[in-house]
């Protein structure tokens, strides 16, 4: 998403440098979507891949289903025709014949999820994708989909600031052998050493309307996470690395997908995979940031349209 300018301006050379650094760090999974920059993210990844020889060095995941009506309002289309067109467009931008994982980015409630799983299974049979996934679905929907077609992954927001997946989704993924791909694992930079300032939040269209980044909530969240930053420093690491390490300690089913525009931040995030937290470390983290610490919901009412609610 960062390649598409969601959190601020960037360039293709900067994104290419990030991808090269990821490979140097042993990172081999890249997650994108057709709507990140309206094709920009996929195009940038595709140009990086074309500049290299041999097969793609990454396991590539992308998504489809989000679109807009004639009035510009966001809607979700899970029909076979729409998902097929979007997938073909993604493959063209990426410059590959198939992707390792294709997600339904948001569920269209007008269609039974069993039918959508059948559509995705067709893409597997056609050789265009190797596995299917869903983003922001509820545990009960996951169970229905798995009954039709194996689901490799479910993508959902999960971090020390957003613990909702622990109320059913983590457990369902563990029981069904599904990977829980955790996006925004450092809480959109709140859990880093360089959290968004009120001035920065004013420049972000997303943060301008997001409850956690508008006042007075932002100031409250910055003050609360200051303690977490001090703890990370005491432990000799960065806040971002500690947040990633905490998430990896939650369940073997969890794979975090942090986003960034800078190589330095990427290295901080990757360092979290090398940290081993013991019971006392986890206790200290939970004392500072217990369940429910964050001020404000993770999404505004408008941003909440699409993700399935289950609690």
Image (cartoon, rainbow, N blue to C red):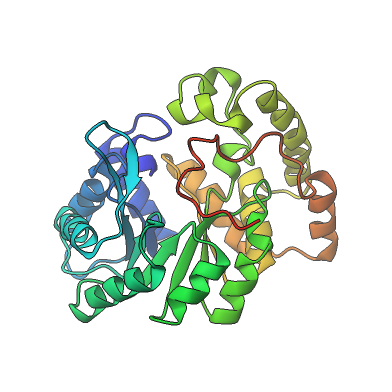
Whether residue 213 appears in this view of the structure is yes
In the rendered image, the quadrant that contains the C terminus is: bottom right
Q: Position of residue 36 (x, y in %)?
A: 32, 43
With respect to residue 151, does 37 lie above or below? Answer: above
- Does 64 sit left or right of 128 as displayed? right
Q: Residue at x 74, y 33 (%)?
A: 226
> Where is the N terminus found, in terms of image quarters?
top left
Q: Position of residue 223 (x, y in %)?
A: 75, 29
Camera-nearest residue between 139 and 238: 139
Q: How many marks?
A: 0
On the image, which quarter does residue 59 sit in?
Answer: bottom left
Q: Image quarter for residue 165?
A: bottom right
Q: Nearer the viewer, residue 198 or 304?
A: 304
Task: Pick the residue in front: 293 or 44.
Answer: 293
Q: Residue at x 59, y 23 (%)?
A: 197
Q: Where is residue 151 shown, x and y percent of the image? A: 42, 75
**Is 8 positioned to the left or the right of 278 in the image?**
left
Question: Residue 130: percent from the left, percent from the top?
Answer: 29, 76
Q: In the drawing, does residue 85 fall left or right of residue 133?
A: left
């Amino acid at each position: 998403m960062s390649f598409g300018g969601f959190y601020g301006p960037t360039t293709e050379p900067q994104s290419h440098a990030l991808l090269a650094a990821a490979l140097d760090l042993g990172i081999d999974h890249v997650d994108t979507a057709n709507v990140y920059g309206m094709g920009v993210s996929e195009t940038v990844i595709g140009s990086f891949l074309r500049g290299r020889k041999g097969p793609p060095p990454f396991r590539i995941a992308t998504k489809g289903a989000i679109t807009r009506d004639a009035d510009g309002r966001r809607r979700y289309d899970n029909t076979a025709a729409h998902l097929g067109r979007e997938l073909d467009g993604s493959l063209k931008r990426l410059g590959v014949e198939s992707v390792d994982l294709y997600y339904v980015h948001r569920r269209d409630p007008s269609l039974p999820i069993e039918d959508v799983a059948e559509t995705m299974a067709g893409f597997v049979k056609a050789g265009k994708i190797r596995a299917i996934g869903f983003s922001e679905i509820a545990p009960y929907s996951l169970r229905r989909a798995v009954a039709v077609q194996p689901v490799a992954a479910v993508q959902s927001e999960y971090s020390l600031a957003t613990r909702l997946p622990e109320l059913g989704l983590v457990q369902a993924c563990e029981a069904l052998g599904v990977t829980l791909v955790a996006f925004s694992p450092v809480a959109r930079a709140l859990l880093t050493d360089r959290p968004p300032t009120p001035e920065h939040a004013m420049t972000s269209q997303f943060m301008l309307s997001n409850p956690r980044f508008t006042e007075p909530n932002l100031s409250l969240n910055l003050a609360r996470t200051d303690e977490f930053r001090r703890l990370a420093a005491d432990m000799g690491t960065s806040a971002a690395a500690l947040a990633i390490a905490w998430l990896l300690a939650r369940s073997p089913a969890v794979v975090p997908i942090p986003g960034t525009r800078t190589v330095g931040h990427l290295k901080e995030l990757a360092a979290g995979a090398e940290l081993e937290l013991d019971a006392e470390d986890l206790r200290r983290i939970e004392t500072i940031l217990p369940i429910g610490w964050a001020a404000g919901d993770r999404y505004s009412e408008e941003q909440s349209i699409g993700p399935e609610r289950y609690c």
